[in-house]
Amino acid sequence: MYWRKVFNIAYKFVGRHDLAEDLTQDVFLKLFKSLDSFDRRANFQTWLISVSRNLCIDHYRSVRKERESIARDVDPADLAPVAPGRSAHAELELRDRVELLRIALDALAPTLRTAVMLRDIQELTYQEIADRLKLPEGTVKSRINRGRTELARQIQRLRAQQDASPKTGVPR
């Protein structure tokens, strides 16, 4: 008799049919369990709507907290599936190398890091980089060369630290 009203309230909160059905079921379970606390002098429909909205608000808050917790605690890259044909071990090694590269890039001087990233990550030509940075092409080539050399040094330093303390993994 009241299913449609409760479902509509739930649907407005979650916007998905399956979740709204689950919430509707939860509302009716809660109503059934607390039926003895209902004041018979009150309007049942008002109580039903109030319980429905409160449960939906609670659901919204719990989902929001869960999302915030995930956002703080998990790097989305860690949730990526293992590539087909690649073992989980190989995937972990690749992720370790990527993290090592990120740390090494962060250690570079900003001018060198920018030049290396534009050339090696974004694959821009020397002339495109020179235009973007408003520098002579020779300066760009020099920065890329120095950046790559310094990047290699940083990676060697980080690997040496990693080998010295294998239990800690990639240094942060």
Image (cartoon, rainbow, N blue to C red):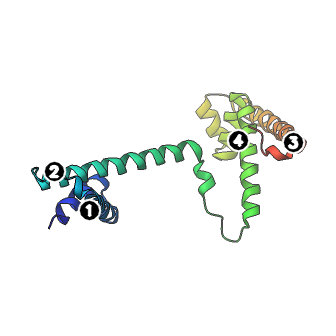
Could you tell me if the residues under marks 4 and 2 are in contact, i.e. CB atoms within 8 Å?
A: no
Residue positioned 81% across, 34% down in the render: 150
Q: Read off the residue under disc 4.
A: 102
Q: Which residue is mark 1?
A: 32
Secondary structure of residue under mark 2: loop
Q: What residue is disc 2 on?
A: 39
Q: Residues within 10 Å of mark 4 (few under 14, many from 20)?
A: few
**Amino acid on which the number 2 mark rests in the picture:** Asp
Vertical position of residue 134 compared to residue 40: above or below: above
Q: Viewed as shown, does residue 118 lie left or right of 35?
A: right
Mark 4 or 2: the one toward you: 2
Contact between labelled residues 3 and 4, with CB atoms less than 8 Å apart: no
Which is more foreground, mark 1 or mark 2? 2
Q: Residues within 10 Å of mark 2 (few under 14, many from 20)?
A: few
Residue type beneath disc 4: Arg
Please give the residue where the numbered disc 3 appears in the rendered image.
Answer: 165
